[in-house]
Image: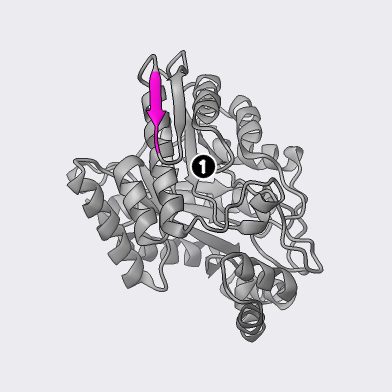
Amino acid sequence: MRREAPLEKAGGGPSTEYGVFLPVGNGGWIVSSTAPPLEASYAENRRIAVLADQLGLDFIMSMGKWRGYGGSTDHWGRTLESLTLMAALAEATTRVQVWATVHANIHNPLVAAKMVATLQDVSGGRAGMNLVAGAYADEFAQMGLWDPDLDHAARYRWAGEWLTAVERLWTEDSVTVDGEFVQLHDGQCRPHPAVRPTLINAGRSAEGLALAAGHCDGAFITADDLTGLARTSTEVKALAAAHGRTIKTYSMLTVVLGDNDAQASARRAAYGQGADVAALAAMKVSWGIPAEQALSMTTEHAGDAAYQTAVVDGSPASVERQITELVIGSGIDGLMLIFPDYVRDLPVFGRHVLPGLRARERAAWA
């Protein structure tokens, strides 16, 4: 299937990128017993990746997750490892960018630099690396890798040292670092990647945005509303410009499709009804929210909480309109999409929503 050529916005900017957040953990991204079952198998993710590639989407990305959240659904109790998965999917696809996730506190920067350089070779220049600073204590305590005295700011200093080391390893023959967190002695990572892999970060704090602005090509951002999303996008781009750099901003969006708006709305509500309150509360606890408060917050808004991102629902035409308004109104450069049933929903999106989005964007920026 031919992929549509990239669209140029007025002023020479790149077209909006649309990608897929792969369901590499059981349950996918809807924490609910009534959502379509997703079992986090390689076969399932390969099928989704090939669909995304054939339908003309721009990237696929997988999270790094080392421990689930329990509950009645055992949400994310079963997961695939990100780097090895994306290497396999690079062989199964030909066009989409393949973005893997690594953790600064798990992956030695030299080891990660070598692995991602290899992924860049395997993929023919389509590799990306999403760096996570590592904030969920239980994930890392099970490995003996959690330091409770290491605060948020320190974790981002670590991430900054780590990224600087990786960037040097991709361009220099010998790298020695005696830093606060990173030590390398005549570190070598050859062959260097012919093209620098894409660097991504999804930190939401001021430290996270600063890290992305100083090192990364893309930042995943969130906000409570469209105005907030536009403000954060402008902020991180201004921070990057102060470093003499440019950066793209992305956000995440769950898309619930139906033959008509009423059917899509009913589908969204049905999946929300089965919200796994225990797993959702455990997820909030992992963010540092006290257990009692986490349970209260989840119980009060369980239906909405089942969805971990902003949601749009409707017919293909309605979804197309809503996404256009989101992209144009926020000024973001891309969306990473989540679907309740990827195999069922992704072809509908690719054939009946994506072409209209490209056409609407062309008209809006003409």
Determine if residue 38 is in view.
Answer: yes
Residue 294 placement (x, y as % from top left): 62, 78
Q: Which residues are magenta?
A: 175-179
Q: Is residue 209 rendered to the left or right of residue 335?
A: left
Quarter where residue 82 is shown? top right
- Residue 195 visible, this orientation: no
**Residue type marked 1:** Ala
Q: Residue at x 49, y 42 (%)?
A: 130
Most frequent secondary structure within the magenta stretch: strand
Q: Position of residue 234 (x, y in %)?
A: 25, 59
Location of the N terminus by quadrant is top right
Above/below status of 99 relative to 305:
above
Q: Is residue 178 magenta?
A: yes
- In front of the other: 213 or 56: 213
**Which structural element holds mark 1?**
loop
Does residue 44 belong to the magenta stretch? no
- Can you say whether 277 is above or below 114 in the image? below
